[in-house]
Image (spheres, rainbow, N blue to C red):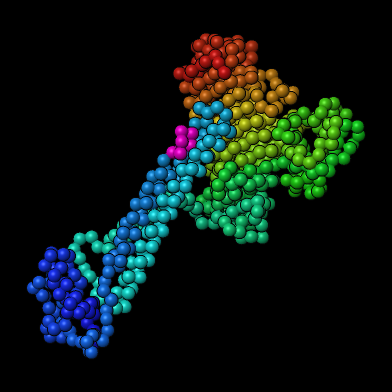
């Protein structure tokens, strides 16, 4: 006979056991087939069994087919779907919490890292401590998040399999009052959609490319098959493979030699993001040409190396054509005494460069491993670009430049910048320089140190000006100047620009401070000159700590230009240091109150004789 669907076959002894348990008030049992309790195929409500019993008949002592009994395991999916999100919530709470006083959260924005550097003794140690703490916190964070996700997905799979078996057996879906399984499932799915949307990075068009020092430019640029070089990244930008809305990520801990000068980006919406992936230190984009053991003796104690593009005598930035050397770095030491003729080389590590060779005076062969910076901006950004979480260093020109719109430069480390000849014997090099036309630019939470000239600069000639520029929460260390502003050409000038909450330390104590020919008053935090345009700039909430010469140096009448509002800053200068450059400004750090009263500047600011 055809078995009754949804029932469980039991013997008479089993039926008696069910009766016994029922009398003890235990929970409702599943449907059972009890022989001898009525006509075949009828539903029987036994007075002592708190369940429905299907009455049937046997063939040869048993039914022709046995239907599997529903078990508690069929409902295990509910627990998996409930527990999974709970574990992920624990992980997310752990991740979004700060990993320490100076650190950001593991999965949240990197807000705290740079802002807290001002309280640390030495940026490098603070950062290493922060990163180690974050590495420890990351383990439980991602363990809980991933485990919760696995349990949640397992619950869905178990539920699907259980339902499929029930439908194959012909069982009707039970209905119950109150919250049902579908609502539980829908709620859990909604939770994960919301949680993952907040925790995972989102890219406008999903076009993400990865670059690793162990990759290959013939790879597709996926995380498992990354590209290798900056040249590949540049070609992808030119072809449109990388465009507005795309993302290119460099592997942390790796070095990449060369530069990126962006063309106008293809695409009509979104931002091109350049950033980092993986664990460890920031990926390093370096401009150095690194000598091989290929120096030859020019004469006496003077050695030469061919640094023309692809000469084969150096590694690193091998395709760069520039031979305009900014400085040399050997055994961790910077050598910046550039001379303008071979005959001027008089002391060890003084150098001169022409269109092919760099010449160095030294008693012994300089050997392999000398890092040679040359004239090439490391990053030249187009409009609609974000650059974050990179290390940029080793150029004779600027670190980052842009005259674009809708640009974000954040959480980068920029150092060892400048020294190449700009024109004649004038040398230059800034950390981040904004050209005329820059608008809606945010520069925040970067660490910039050891520049030939200025950490942050906005300068140029033209009518487009600079609009809605914000420099915020950066740490500027040992640069010759901290902030430079100048403009010519009329037009809009500086409009709605703000320099806020930055920490500026030891202006005028850069690697180039004592080798510059124009040292007079240039060891300063604020530098303005040739201000021939309208000015709307606010400077507030900053800490200016220590300077070789003075707090501010201004051309013309030696006063801070009208339109630059300076207030609520902290200014600490050593004893006897001038507040402002020039004979027009006689006040020293001990006479700050007189200077404030005379100029009307730095209202509500704090001055101290220290540092």
Q: In this view of the protein, can residue 604 be seen by the observer?
A: yes
Q: Position of residue 502 (x, y in %)?
A: 52, 29
Q: Farthest residue toward the left?
A: 47
Q: Look at the image and say whether residue 99 sits in the magenta stretch.
A: yes
The picture places residue 118, in percent across and down from the top left corner, at 52, 28
Q: Is residue 151 left or right of residue 525?
A: left
Left-right relation of 30 to 122: left
Query: Picture coordinates of residue 23 (x, y %)?
Result: 11, 67
User: On the rendered structure, is 92 left or right of 385?
Assistant: left
Q: Which residues are magenta?
A: 98-103
Which residue is pictured at 45% across the width and 50% down the height?
142
Taking depth in this image into account, of 452 and 174 the one nearest to the observer is: 174
Taking the spot 64% from the left edge, 11% from the top edge, the residue there is 583
The magenta stretch spans residue 434: no
Q: Residue at x 54, y 18 (%)?
A: 572
Q: Quadrant of the C terminus?
A: top right
Vertical comparison of 582 with 351: above or below: above
Q: Residue furthest front?
A: 13
> How far across and how far down the image is residue 314, in percent?
78, 45
């Amino acid at each position: 006979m055809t078995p009754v669907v949804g029932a469980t076959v039991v013997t008479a002894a089993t039926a008696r056991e069910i009766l016994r348990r029922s009398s003890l008030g235990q929970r409702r049992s599943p449907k059972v087939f009890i022989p001898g309790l009525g006509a075949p195929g009828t539903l029987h409500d036994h007075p002592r069994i708190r369940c429905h019993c299907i009455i049937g008949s046997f063939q040869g002592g048993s039914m022709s087919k046995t239907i599997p009994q529903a078990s508690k395991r069929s409902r295990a999916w509910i627990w998996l779907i409930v527990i999974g999100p709970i574990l992920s919530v624990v992980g997310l709470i752990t991740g979004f919490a700060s990993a320490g006083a100076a650190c950001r959260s593991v999965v949240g924005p990197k807000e705290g890292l740079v802002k807290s550097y001002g309280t640390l003794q030495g940026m490098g140690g603070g950062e290493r401590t922060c990163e180690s703490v974050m590495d420890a916190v990351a383990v439980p964070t991602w363990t809980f998040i991933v485990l919760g996700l696995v349990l949640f997905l397992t619950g869905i799979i178990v539920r699907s399999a259980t339902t499929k078996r029930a439908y194959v057996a012909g069982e009707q879906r039970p209905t119950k009052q109150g919250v049902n399984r579908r609502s539980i499932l829908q709620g859990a799915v909604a939770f994960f959609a919301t949680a993952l949307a907040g925790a995972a990075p989102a890219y406008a068009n999903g076009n993400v490319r990865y670059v690793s020092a162990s990759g290959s430019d013939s790879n597709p640029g996926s995380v498992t098959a990354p590209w290798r070089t900056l040249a590949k990244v540049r070609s992808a930008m030119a072809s449109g493979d990388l465009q507005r809305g795309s993302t290119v990520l460099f592997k942390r801990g790796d070095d990449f030699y060369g530069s990126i000068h962006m063309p106008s980006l293809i695409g009509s919406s979104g931002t091109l993001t350049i950033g980092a992936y993986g664990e460890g230190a920031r990926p390093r984009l370096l401009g150095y040409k690194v000598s091989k053991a290929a120096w030859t003796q020019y004469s006496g104690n003077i050695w030469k190396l061919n640094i023309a593009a692809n000469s084969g005598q150096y590694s690193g930035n091998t395709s760069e054509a520039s031979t305009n050397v900014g400085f040399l770095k050997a055994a961790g030491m910077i050598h910046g005494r550039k001379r303008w003729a071979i005959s001027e080389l008089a002391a060890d590590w003084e150098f001169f460069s022409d269109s092919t060779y760099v010449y160095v005076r030294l008693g012994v062969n300089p050997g392999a491993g000398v890092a040679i910076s040359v004239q090439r901006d490391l990053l030249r950004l187009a409009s609609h670009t974000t650059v974050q979480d990179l290390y940029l260093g080793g150029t004779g020109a600027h670190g980052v430049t842009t005259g674009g719109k809708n640009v974000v430069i954040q959480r980068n480390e920029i150092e060892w910048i400048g020294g190449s000849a700009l024109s004649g014997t004038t040398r230059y090099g800034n950390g981040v320089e904004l050209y005329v036309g820059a608008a809606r630019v945010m520069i925040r939470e970067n660490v910039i140190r050891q520049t030939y000239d200025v950490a942050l600069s906005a300068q140029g000639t033209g009518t487009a000006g600079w609009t809605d520029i914000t420099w915020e929460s950066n740490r500027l260390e040992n640069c010759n100047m901290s902030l430079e502003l100048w403009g010519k050409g009329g037009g809009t000038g500086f409009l709605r620009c703000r320099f806020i909450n930055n920490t500026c330390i030891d202006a005028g104590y850069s690697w180039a401070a004592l080798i510059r020919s124009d040292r007079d008053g240039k060891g300063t935090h604020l530098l303005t000159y040739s201000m021939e345009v309208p000015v709307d700039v606010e400077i507030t909430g900053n800490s200016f700590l220590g300077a070789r010469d003075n707090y501010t140096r201004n051309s013309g009448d030696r006063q801070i230009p009208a339109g630059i509002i300076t207030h609520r800053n902290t200014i600490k200068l050593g004893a006897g240091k001038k507040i402002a450059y020039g004979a027009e400004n006689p006040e020293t750090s001990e006479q700050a109150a007189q200077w404030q009263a005379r100029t009307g500047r730095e209202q509500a600011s704090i001055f101290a004789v220290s540092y």
